[in-house]
Amino acid sequence: MSGGYRYKVPFRRRRENKTNYHKRLKLLSSKKPRVVVRKTNKKIIIQLIEYNPTGDIVLASAMSSELSLYGYNQNKRNIPAAYLTGFLFGLKVKKMDIDEAILDIGLNTSIKGSRIYAALKGIIDSGFYVKHSPEILPDDDLIKGNHIDKSFSSIVDKVKKEIITIT
């Protein structure tokens, strides 16, 4: 272990590779709410978070496990599930009278057309504004699930209509 009188122990969450404090400070300096997209081994989680000095406040959230309420009984981790979760999240946030937010992907690597950006496309398609670059979003064939199965696009369209009618 490093030692010496000049050694400074990094913050615990930085040592555990959970938080990049430099990136977090840049996001917080915008003074806008953050759309935090996280992917786990079983689902996609999207939250609208506002900074507070005593601790961040979660204003709204959506998880891909909620899609089963709307008739989506497929895998909850793939690109169509991320898109539908983003769409559901966007409709929830539109009711809250918040105009725009910034995207926070955390320690995830930015890969063009990934699940994180599929969720972003769902948020944008619902009518909520998040600043982005259009070329990073996935193609419509990936969002419809044509790479999984040709009949998958009808499932995505059906669930999307169900989300609109219920919310």
Image (cartoon, helix red, strand yellow):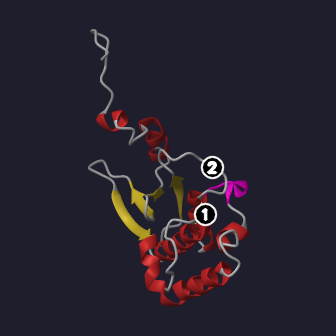
List the residue tagged with mark 1: 118
Q: Residue furthest bottom?
A: 165
Asked if labels 1 and 2 touch by Cβ distance under 8 angstroms, the answer is no
> In the rendered structure, which amino acid carries the disc numbered 2?
Ile
Which quarter of the picture shows residue 138?
bottom right
Where does the image place residue 30, in percent across and percent down from the top left?
A: 50, 48
Mark 2, Cα crowd under 10 Å, few <14 / some 14-19 / many 20+, is few
In front here: 33 or 48? 48
Where does the image place residue 92, in percent across and percent down from the top left?
A: 46, 76
Classify the position of the N terminus by image quarter: top left
Q: Is residue 28 above or below residue 149?
A: above
Which quarter of the picture shows residue 17?
top left
Q: Residue furthest front?
A: 149
Which residue is found at the position 49% from the left and 70% from the top?
Answer: 76
Which residue is found at the position 67% from the left and 52% from the top?
Answer: 112
Which residue is found at the position 53% from the left and 66% from the top?
Answer: 99
Q: Secondary structure at mark 2?
A: loop
List the residue tagged with mark 2: 111
Q: Secondary structure at mark 1?
A: helix
> In the rendered structure, which amino acid carries the disc numbered 1?
Ala
Q: Is residue 130 above or below residue 83?
A: above
Report the side of 90 relative to 111 (left or right).
left
Which residue is found at the position 29% from the left and 35% from the top?
Answer: 12
Q: Earlier in the sequence, mark 2 or mark 1?
A: 2
In front here: 60 or 116? 116
Mark 1, Cα crowd under 10 Å, few <14 / some 14-19 / many 20+, is many
Where does the image place residue 149, in percent across and percent down from the top left?
A: 67, 75
**Marks 2/1: CA distance?**
11 Å
The magenta segment is 131-137
In front here: 149 or 124? 149
